[in-house]
């Protein structure tokens, strides 16, 4: 009887997990379709728009945040984001963005005018915590299912938006694949981003051994499953001495 009860619990848990996964799949499709619809209006000239100037002079993640806030605000207001990245040092010039990423808007928005467009003053336009707190509410259309089905709903919601903004061109994907082949990048692999220089004033120092401990735990779990693997790590760092520490 105890075994039967345990099996019943396992079945119920498994069924709940399947339902949760299906709910998240439907939610992902709904969000992506909503973003695609807003970003591809049939008549961009008359559609409500939000012009987003991406000129952040700092690191890549800082620019990602700025673009994200534009999209969060635009989704709340039902507006199409017109992204201007010509001054962004990661993608300078008129074709800087399109050399790496897919356009964030459809063809009808090419060279669109300023009719029905806001360029500032929208919620989240200023980077202060108080200002951006105005756009932290999750969309009412997804919040109930999302909170019930995902342990970190904000990470999922922002992740959906960022995954749309930074869709890679096929040429970019091919360049990445070529790099992986050339460098022997194979799975499974543990990737580490160890940042030292400009982050000394913003984040606590973490010894290389802390990173390696997580890698060790990852591979130990695979070994327990009976997988015979070569242990690999990929390190991205701004401090060359890190490589020596790892060796």
Image (spheres, rainbow, N blue to C red):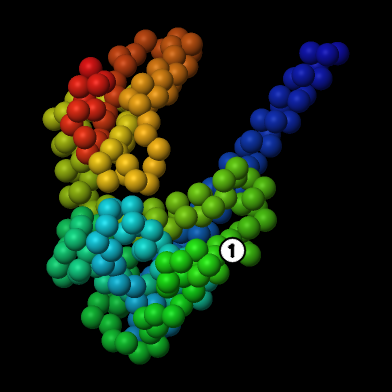
To which quarter of the image does residue 38 belong? bottom left
Q: Residues within 10 Å of mark 1 (few under 14, many from 20)?
A: few
| Residue 111 position within the rendered picture, expressed as x and y whole percent measured from the top left | 23, 80
Name the one closer to the observer, 245 or 9.
245
Q: Please, which residue is most extreme toward the right here? A: 1
Which residue is at 36% across, 81% downward?
119
User: Would you identify the image quadrant in which residue 98 lies?
Assistant: bottom left
Residue 20 can be seen, yes or no: yes
User: Where residue 64 sits: x, y (%)?
Assistant: 34, 57
Report the quarter where the C terminus lies: top left
Q: Residue 39, relative to residue 57: is it above or below?
A: below
The quarter of the picture where residue 177 lies is top left
The x and y percentages for residue 235 are 26, 30
Q: Is residue 137 left or right of residue 225?
A: right
**SS of the residue under disc 1:** loop
Location of residue 6 with respect to 28 vertically, above or below: above
Note whether 3 is above or below 148 in the view shown.
above
The residue wearing badge 1 is 137
The reply to whether residue 106 is visible in this rendering is no
| Residue at the image point whose x is 47% and y is 55% from the top | 158
Quadrant in the picture for the N terminus: top right
């Amino acid at each position: 009887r105890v075994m039967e009860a345990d099996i019943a619990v396992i079945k119920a848990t498994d069924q709940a997990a399947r339902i949760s996964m299906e709910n998240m799949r439907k939610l992902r499709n709904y969000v992506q379709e909503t973003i695609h619809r807003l970003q591809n209006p049939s008549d961009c000239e008359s559609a409500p728009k939000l012009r987003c100037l991406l000129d952040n002079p700092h690191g890549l993640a800082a620019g990602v945040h700025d673009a994200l806030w534009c999209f969060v605000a635009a989704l709340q207001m039902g507006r199409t984001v017109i992204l201007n990245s010509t001054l962004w040092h990661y993608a300078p010039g008129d074709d800087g963005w399109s050399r790496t990423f897919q356009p964030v808007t459809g063809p009808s928005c090419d060279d669109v005018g300023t009719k029905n467009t806001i360029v500032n003053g929208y919620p989240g336009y200023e980077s202060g915590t108080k200002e951006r707190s105005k756009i932290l509410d999750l969309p009412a259309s997804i919040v109930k299912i999302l909170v019930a089905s995902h342990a970190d709903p904000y990470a999922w919601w922002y992740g959906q938006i960022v995954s749309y903004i930074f869709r890679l061109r096929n040429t970019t994907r091919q360049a990445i694949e070529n790099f992986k082949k050339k460098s022997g990048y194979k799975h499974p692999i543990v990737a580490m981003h160890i940042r030292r220089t400009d982050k000394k004033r913003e984040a606590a120092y973490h010894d290389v051994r802390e990173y390696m401990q997580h890698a060790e735990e990852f591979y130990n779990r695979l070994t327990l499953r009976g997988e015979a693997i070569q242990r690999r790590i990929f390190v991205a760092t701004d401090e060359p001495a890190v490589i020596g520490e790892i060796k």
